[in-house]
Amino acid sequence: MAFDIDMIKSVYSQISERVDKAREIVGTPLTLSEKILYSHLWDGVSNKAFVRGKDYVDFAPDRIACQDATAQMALLQFMQAGKDNVAVPTTVHCDHLIQAKEGASTDLKHANDVSSEVFKFLESVSNKYGIGFWKPGAGIIHQVVLENYAFPGGMMIGTDSHTVNAGGLGMVAIGVGGADAVDVMAGMAWELKFPKLIGVKLTGKLSGWTAPKDVILKVAEILTVKGGTGAIVEYFGEGATSMSCTGKGTICNMGAEIGATTSTFGYDESMERYLRATEREDVADAANDVKEYLTADPEVYANPEQYFDEVIEINLSELGPLLNGPFTPDLSTTVGTEMTKKAKANDWPLKVEWGLIGSCTNSSYEDLSRASSIAQQALDKNLKTKAEFGINPGSEKVRYTTERDGILEIFEKLGAKIFTNACGPCIGQWARYSDPKNAPKNSIIHSFNRNFAKRADGNPNTHAFVASPEMVAAIAIAGRLDFNPLTDKLISEDGEEVMFDEPTGWELPPKGFEVLDNGYLAPDEDGSGVVVSVSPDSERLQLLEPFTPIGDAITDAKLLIKAFGKCTTDHISMAGPWLRYRGHLDNISNNCLIGAVNAYNKKTNFVKNQLSGDYEGVPDTARAYKAAGIKSIVVGDHNYGEGSSREHAAMEPRHLGVAAVLVKSFARIHETNLKKQGMLGLTFANEADYDLIQEDDVINFLDLNEFAPDKQLAIEFVHKDGTKDVIKTDHTYNAAQIAWYKEGSALNLIKKENASA
């Protein structure tokens, strides 16, 4: 029987009434996304039609998922909320704090040794508050969620941007910061601006070397890394129904790379097959009873232009395999001739040193089986593998089953390292170099979702390219970025010219899934006696102190940094070795904005301290201002805060005295995270005003005492020569969010309300 089956049946028992009422209120047929949104309103049955991209709406998610790196801060915040138990089903998954180096058994033992304090903390908090706990090695959060918790028509939030993976099973699953999760854990509504809707019609059918990964790589090319911001992407058409459930998950997973709120597919037979294969027949049966409510109304898919804000059409029969990168997931190149030309023109290293398969994006049984069919051909055709191989199975269930079926053995015969069922290189947990900053220029290829500079191995000179698992296998074996397995031949160890045949694989294991220990620990029925202790001397964990309200008078503030170009959450709060401090706000704040490029000297972690006149690291300068009682602000470019949902990227500047972040545009999750922490997240009313801001500026907010919804804020920048510029800034705060600001944070408001309840 499935986890939380009673909750799932409860969702289905009310979906028809809520969707029918919403259809009546809206006055048109409904998309799947709208059905899920309207059936999860906090107030129950809808009484108004919401305006996409404008109205803030309160929702009631069905469940929450947290990974260990973000769960630390989320649970530290929840511990302050004054609650005895989580209000909705919640799980914690230990997948981020395991470094890939030697191989699964050695690496997992090392992680359990060095991070035992954190794992014990997470397990004890889970026990105390009724949270399901997945041990280190159990698997990657989003694969485990797909196998165990995702269900068609449900709504889930998770403290990781790739929570959206569950859209492969027909959910609206959305990545959030920990403060959002705390709201829902505490039994409060979750607020979201009602999303716009992008429809992607898939015609034809995938075949040969083309994989579901190529669909999202193509969508990323079309929409770019910010084209999905504020929108749900809904896939439909014959091409969608012909794909496997895990293939759908791959597409939804990388929707985070286009900034989409989430992505989803309508319930179909592939989802039913996956539910039954993962021993959730009860969910499949319940879904079948309401299946017309688990996909869009027929009129929507027949005439999508009438119901979506934007429609894209992709013919899968004409789509070829793609490589996206380097340094951004939306730079798409067709394998072969086009890649050869582009690589030579841009001086990308053609030699490929590593091929990495796995991550939450492509670590299913199907993914590994299709990639192994290429690996098996290398063995059969006597090919010597030119690049090194690394494999991260998505879960212990996938690992055990692929080992049983001989799939992992095929990779091992090629010398592959089978890493732990964890994120590993995908999030920078890869001990590839002893000195990554001075490592050589090189190319790697992987089936992950992100390829920002330094993302995988800490080396700014690593050119990472994203592809399907089968393409990763072929190019790793060839060792060349310009290799095209559809047309190119390789020379075997016998001196013969050979070619790869098309990849083959299994959607689901022919002999079924099997696992001895899936790594799950259920919480105590009564956790009141569980004691959660944090040593005051710990360098890994630190109990939180409430933030003090910034107030309605910001004067004589200093510019901390004016960030130039792309500034993701990796630039604001790096992962990799810094993951060890995710539960200690003061220690991890020492990485605050150290990856952001200073617009005035084009260097990282080198900004002017206006108090001393010296150039110092960003955290050092921020601490100097804070010690002097001076507020600071950060200025940024477009899509500021894209990437991971990590709320540390908001909490660290807040902790170091940053009062406001002023940018050309925000990524959705990061903007929300800033609001939750009681900061000002503002955008230029005139983007050209970015150029007016100078390195030595003193900053005054002129009308912050009039902070109100839909009202611009004026900021005065006093330059070193005495001249001034006053600029107008926009914001998206509503009345409730302004209340967070005035209280110092959303959590402060929760505590205040709980205390008076």
Image: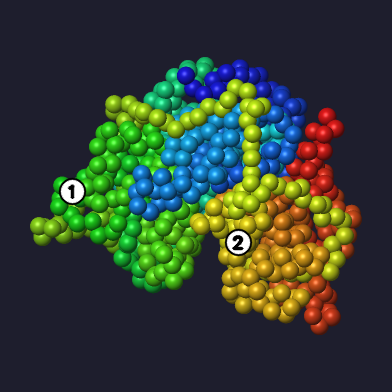
Say which label, 2 or 1, has the lower sequence index. Answer: 1
Other-residue count near label 1 (Cα within 10 Å), few / some / many at <14 / 14–19 / ≥20? some
Q: Residue at x 39, y 70 (%)?
A: 440
Q: Nearer the viewer, residue 750 or 519?
A: 519
Locate residue 564, reporting x and y percent. 62, 69
Q: Nearer the viewer, residue 133 or 313?
A: 133
Q: Relative to 496, is 676 on the left or the right? A: right
Among the 4 quarters of the image, the one containing residue 626? bottom right
Q: Give the amino acid type for the residue marked by disc 1 in the picture.
A: Leu
Q: Residue at image x 83%, y 59%?
A: 713
On screen, residue 363 above or below 329: above
Left or right: residue 92 versus residue 498 is right
Coordinates of residue 399 in the picture (x, y in percent): 35, 37
Residue 504 appears left or right of 721: left
Where is residue 79? Give x, y as percent: 69, 38
Badge 2: few (under 14), some or many (20 or more) residues near its Cα, within 10 Å? many
Query: Residue 621 appears at what percent x and percent y?
Result: 70, 69
Q: Are marks 2 and 1 in contact (CB under 8 Å)?
A: no
For the point 38% across and 33% down, the residue is: 397
Question: In 3D space, how far apart are the residues under numbered discs 2 and 1 (Cα atoms)?
Answer: 45 Å
**In the rendered image, which residue does mark 2 sit on?**
591
SS state under label 2: helix
Q: Does 500 appear above or below 606?
A: above
Quarter residue 250 falls in: top left
Name the front one of labels 2 and 1: 2
Tell me what residue is drawn at x 50 percent, y 41 percent. 94
Q: Secondary structure at mark 1?
A: helix
Pick the quarter of the image with the C terminus.
top right
Identify the residue position indicated by label 1 in the image.
379
For the residue marked with disc 2, what is the amino acid?
A: Asn
The mark total stands at 2
